[in-house]
């Protein structure tokens, strides 16, 4: 516990997707448990925070604010209309809660809350896991007291940025290397909603992939909505279902990473877990991701030698089959990529972020 900041109060703002909410909760727990802080969250009614934050035992304040990027003109106008109201509401929340520091994790609520903190001269910390910051963090980047980032290339967007890494469960950092001679395994994962491109393409090429890679097994996480259709597609393809597991959600990620030789994935927050686990990957960035941040993430992981990238515009069944076959049948290549991935991992990120937040609060006290 940081005794130099008695009665520490921390306001964490942002959310929407799991990529924002899950690390925000990790930071909240760290501030509460390691630094004795009183923690509150600010989010919107449309994000996962409405369920996950109360489940974690934290108070959640809601504001009304929407998207500005990759939306229709009508939605953009509505957001611009709501934005001043969102900032006004955040000014009220900051005045009433009187936080020592406000942490912005990106997402809808982050911008208004961070702006309110800047206006009221409350110290702020930005958390940015992606290579290219989202709109909220870009707007406040030069005004924050400090920033915790995952990639060295991201530091240029912020004042006092430190490469801390991303909060990843410690169990993932201790995933053992794959044993020589183990039966090969392909893990397909794409966050809680899965990836339509994987769900539609993989059943059509799985039989040939299983034939080309002796002993291969596949674990395919589809997302809840696509589970039945994807499982049915595999079944209709005449595949030996003892070699393919189709599931909506994976709750045992350390075990799944431990058993995988290669991961087919998007390139959002997953890239930090892949590095922690030392897992080679074929990354297919989500083309509609804000500011094309997933492609930028993937490019840096590829540059580090830990992954290959396949753009969705170039993904056909034949191309995906060839890329997966080439990687899964090259043990030396996979071992080299695995070592490169581990070199990019950053254990202890959560503790470093917690110390940063507490330190900013202490300076501002």
Image (cartoon, rainbow, N blue to C red):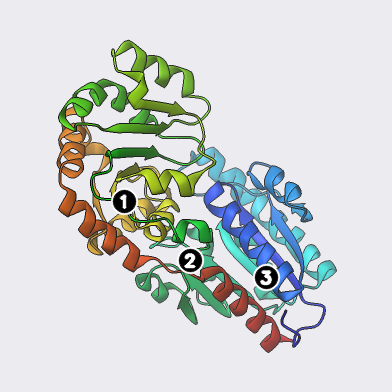
Coordinates of residue 219 in the picture (x, y in percent): 38, 33
Q: Which residue is mark 1?
A: 178
* Residue at point 53%, 63% (across, down): 167
Q: Quadrant of residue 32?
A: bottom right
Q: Quadrant of residue 322?
A: top left
| CB contact under 8 Å: marks 1 and 2 | no
First in sequence: mark 1 or mark 2? 2
Question: Disc 1 or disc 2, which is closer to the eye?
Answer: 1
Q: Is residue 118 visible?
A: yes
First in sequence: mark 1 or mark 3? 3
Coordinates of residue 38 in the picture (x, y in percent): 79, 68
Q: Is residue 319 left or right of residue 252?
A: left
The CA span between labels 1 and 3 is: 42 Å
Q: Which residue is mark 2?
A: 138
- Helix, strand or loop for disc 1: loop
Viewer-side residue, 255 vs 158: 255
* Residue at point 24%, 31% (across, down): 215
* Residue at point 54%, 67% (across, down): 127
- Helix, strand or loop for disc 2: helix
| CB contact under 8 Å: marks 1 and 3 | no
* Residue at point 31%, 51% (across, down): 178
Question: Disc 1 or disc 3, which is closer to the eye?
Answer: 1
The CA span between labels 2 and 3 is: 16 Å
The CA span between labels 1 and 2 is: 40 Å
Q: Quadrant of residue 104?
A: bottom right
- Helix, strand or loop for disc 3: strand
Coordinates of residue 23 in the picture (x, y in percent): 57, 58
Q: Which residue is mark 3?
A: 102
* Crowdedness near tag 3: few (<14), some (14–19) or many (≥20) residues, C-alpha within 10 Å: many
* Crowdedness near tag 2: few (<14), some (14–19) or many (≥20) residues, C-alpha within 10 Å: some
Residue 198 sits above or below residue 352 on the image: above
């Amino acid at each position: 516990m940081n005794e130099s900041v008695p009665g520490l109060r921390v306001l964490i703002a942002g959310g929407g997707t799991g990529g924002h909410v899950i690390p925000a909760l990790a930071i909240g727990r760290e501030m509460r448990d390691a630094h004795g802080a009183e923690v509150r969250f600010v989010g919107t009614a449309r994000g996962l925070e409405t369920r996950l934050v109360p489940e974690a035992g934290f108070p959640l304040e809601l504001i009304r604010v929407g998207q500005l990027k990759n939306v229709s003109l009508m939605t953009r106008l509505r957001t611009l209309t709501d934005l001043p109201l969102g900032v006004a509401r955040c000014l009220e929340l900051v005045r009433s809660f009187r936080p020592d520091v406000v942490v912005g994790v990106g997402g809808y609520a982050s911008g208004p809350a961070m702006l309110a903190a800047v206006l009221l001269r409350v110290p702020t910390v930005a958390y940015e896991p992606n290579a290219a910051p989202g709109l909220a963090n870009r707007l406040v980047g030069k005004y924050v007291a400090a920033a915790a980032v995952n990639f060295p290339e991201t530091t240029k967007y912020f004042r006092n940025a430190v490469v801390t890494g991303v909060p990843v469960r410690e169990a993932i950092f201790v995933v053992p290397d794959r044993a020589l001679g183990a039966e090969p395994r392909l893990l397909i994962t794409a966050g809680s909603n899965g990836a339509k491109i994987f769900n539609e393409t993989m059943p059509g090429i799985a039989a040939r992939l299983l034939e080309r890679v002796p002993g291969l097994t596949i674990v395919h996480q589809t997302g809840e909505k696509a589970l039945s259709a994807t499982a049915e597609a595999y079944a209709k393809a005449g595949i030996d279902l003892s070699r393919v597991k189709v599931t909506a959600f994976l709750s045992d990620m350390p075990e799944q990473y431990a058993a995988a030789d290669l991961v087919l994935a998007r390139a959002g927050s997953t890239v930090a877990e892949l590095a922690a686990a030392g897992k080679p990957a074929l990354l297919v960035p989500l083309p509609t991701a804000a500011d094309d941040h997933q492609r930028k993430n993937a490019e840096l992981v590829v540059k580090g030698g830990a992954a290959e990238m396949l753009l969705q515009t170039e993904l056909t069944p034949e191309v995906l089959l060839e890329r997966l076959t080439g990687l899964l049948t090259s043990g030396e290549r996979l071992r080299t990529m695995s070592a490169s991935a581990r070199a990019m991992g950053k254990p202890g990120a959560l503790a470093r972020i917690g110390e940063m937040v507490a330190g900013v609060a202490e300076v501002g006290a």
